[in-house]
Image (spheres, helix red, strand yellow):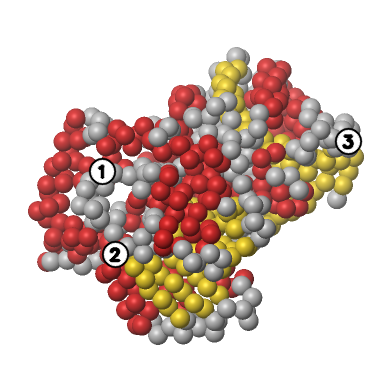
Amino acid sequence: MKSEHPASWTTSEAGFNANDGTRLFYRAWQPKVSRTDGPQRALVFLHRGHEHSGRIASLVERFGSQHDWAFAYDSRGHGHSPGERGAAPGFATLVDDLDAFVAHVAHRHGIEPQNIVVVANSVGAVVAATWVHDYAPRIRGLVMAAAAFAIKLYVPLAKPALRFARRFKPDLFVTSYIRPGMLTHSRQEADAYAADSLIAKAISAQILLELADTAERIVADAAAIDVPVLMLAADKDYVVHEGPQKTFFERLSSPLKRYVRLTDCYHAVFYERDISVALEASRDFIAACFAEAPRSPAYYVAADSNSASARAYTALQRDEYGSAVTRASHALQRRMLKVFGPLSDGMRVGLKHGFDSGASLDYVYRNQAGGKMVFGAVMDRGYLDAVGWRGIRVRKVQLQQLLAERIAAHPVHEPLRILDIAAGSARYVLETVKRFQDRDVEVTLCDYEQHNVDRARDLAAHLQLRAKVDCRRRDAFDGASYAGEEGKYDIAIVSGLYELFSENAMVLRSLEGVVASLRPGGYLIYTAQPWHPQVEMIAGTLTNHRGEQWRMRPRPQAEMDALVRVAGAEKSATLIGVDGIFTVSVARKAAVPGAAG
C-alpha cells in the first residue's frame, strides 16, 4: 500500500521475513525526487521499547533528508508485527531481526549497508549497538538517543528479584512505571503517546534481563566498535542512567564520534518540546558520515598491532592485566589445576594436549562428563558447562547448519568438493556429510597434528560414509599446502583456527590460500571469536597446544570480515553464539575474478 506524504516522500507499508521465518511489518518512505549525486541513501529508524514504527513518521520529515529513503519496522511483539506484546524469543532475536531487515533493504530496495545510517532510541539503540558489535555491518553511521544500557528500575534489587521470580514464572511480564509526562515536556506528544492503542505497556522480564546483560557486555567491549557514532544523552532522563552511555562513548574506537548532552530533556529525545539541538546534531553528524568514505578493508590488516584488542593482548603478554590480587588468584588456580585437574577427564585432556587442541575440542563436543571418583565427574561437569565451552558446542551446531545449507543448495547432480584446512577430528564436517549419503561428495581434511589426521580417518570409517574422504597432514599457514589446489573446491571451512593466532599477516596468508582453492562463486565458512568474558582467567590458568599460557587476542568481527574481504571473499551471513563469544560466518568468492575487494 502506498500513500502520498505531505512533504517529500511517498509512504508504503510492507513486510519482510526475519531469519526464523516470522513476517514483520515495516514502513518505507521513498523520496519523490531521488538523489542524483551518488548512490541512493537511507535512514533506518528503530523505535523505542513499547512503541512502533508509526511514531517514526514525524521524524522522517523533521530529519529533512528529502532525497533519501527512510525505513522503520515494528519490532516483534510491537505494533503490527506478530508475537505476544512486549515479548520476543530473546534479545538476540531482536538484534538478528535488525540484521535481516537491513539485508532486506539491500535486496528489495537496492540500498547497500554502506549507504545507511541507523537512528535508534532507547532499547532500539542497544539493539543497534549490539548489531554493530556482533555482526559488524558496514553501515555509514549510527545515531544513538538515550541508549538504554542501564534502565532505572528504582526498586532495590529489582534485577535479582526478577531472575528469582522467573524460576517460578518464566513468562513473567513487567508493566512499565513510566507515565507519558515522564518521557517529554511536550503536552501534545505526551497525550499522543497516552492515546496510542498500539503502544505495549508491558515488557517481558526475560527481554528486560537479557537487555541488561547484553548492554553490560557491549559497554565492556565498546572498543571493538569503530563505525561513526553520535550519542544524544538527556540530562533529565527518568528512564535510563547516563553513566553507561558516557562509558560506552569513551571506549568507542570510532574515528568519528560525538557526544551531545541535551539540557532540560527527558527520555523521548526526538519527541521533546524543543528538539532543535538534537536534530541539528543529528543532521550535522549524518552529513559528516556521508562526507567520508568508509574504511578500506585493508586498514584492518594492521589491527593486530594498532587497535584496542592489540593493546589488551600486549597487556596479557606482559602480565599487566587486572590487579595483583587477580593475578595471584590465577596463579593459585593454575597450581590447583595441576593437582586436581587429572581427576577430570576433560581437564586431563587439556593438560596433556592443550586446552585449545583438537583433542580438547572433540571432548567438549561430546559433552559427556567423566572423571575419577564422584568428585572428578562433578568437577568435569562444571568444566564442560563453562560459558566458553557451551559457546563452542553452539558454534558446532551453527557451523553444521551453514554447511548443511550450502551442501543442500549445491546442484544435486554435480559433484561437491569440501576442504577443511584445520579439521582436528573433523566431527562437525563428517557428521554433516553423513546426512547427504545420496550426494557425490569429496571431503579433504587437513591438520597440522598427525594424531588429529588419524582420528579424522578413524571417524570417517566409523561413520561408514559413502563420500570420498582424504585425510592429509598439512600446515594451514604454509602456502605450499594450497599449491596445485587452485579453483578445486566448492566449500572451504576454517573453524576454530584463526582465533588461536594474533598475527593478521599469517591469517591473511592462509585465507588467501584458502580462497584461491575455491572455485569462482565458491563459499568459505569461517569462525571468529570477537570477545571472551574470561580472557584474563584463561591466560592466567590454562595452557595451549604449545604448552604455553593460553593468551588470546579476541579479533573483532569487523577485523575478521575485513581480512576475508581482502583475501577475495564477501561475507553474506553471520550466526551469533552464546553471549556473542563465537560467530560462524559464510562468505562467497566472487564469481568474476577481482569482483570482491
Q: Secondary structure at mark 3?
A: loop
Q: Residues within 10 Å of mark 2 (few under 14, many from 20)?
A: some
Label 2, label 1: how far apart the Cα atoms are = 23 Å
Q: CA distance from mark 3 to mark 1?
A: 57 Å
What residue do we see at 50% from left, 67% from top?
Answer: 485
The spot of residue 498 in percent (x, y) is: 40, 52
- Dot 2 amino acid type: Glu
Nearest the camera: 500 or 323?
500
Residue for badge 3: 33
| 184 to the left or right of 41 | left
Instruction: Measure how far apart labels 2 and 3 are at the Cα level.
Output: 62 Å
User: Pointers 2 and 3 in contact (CB under 8 A)?
Assistant: no
Q: Residue furthest left?
A: 339
Q: Quadrant of residue 357?
A: bottom left
Estimate how packed mark 3 is, as few (under 14), some (14 to 19) or many (20 or more) residues with alpha carbons within 10 Å.
few
Residue displayed at 61% across by 14% down: 264
Q: Is residue 58 visible?
A: no
Question: Quick one: label 3 or label 1, which is nearer the N terminus?
Answer: 3
* Residue under pointer 1: 539
- Identify the mark at residue 449; answer none if there is no mark: 2
Callout 1, which amino acid? Answer: Ala
Q: Nearer the viewer, residue 222 or 315?
A: 315
In the image: residue 442, left or right of residue 6: left
Q: Is residue 174 above or below residue 230?
A: below
What is the number of the mark on residue 68?
none
Between label 2 and label 1, give the one nearer the viewer.
2
Q: Of helix, strand and loop, which one carries label 2?
A: loop
Where does residue 151 sit, x and y in percent of width and height? 49, 32
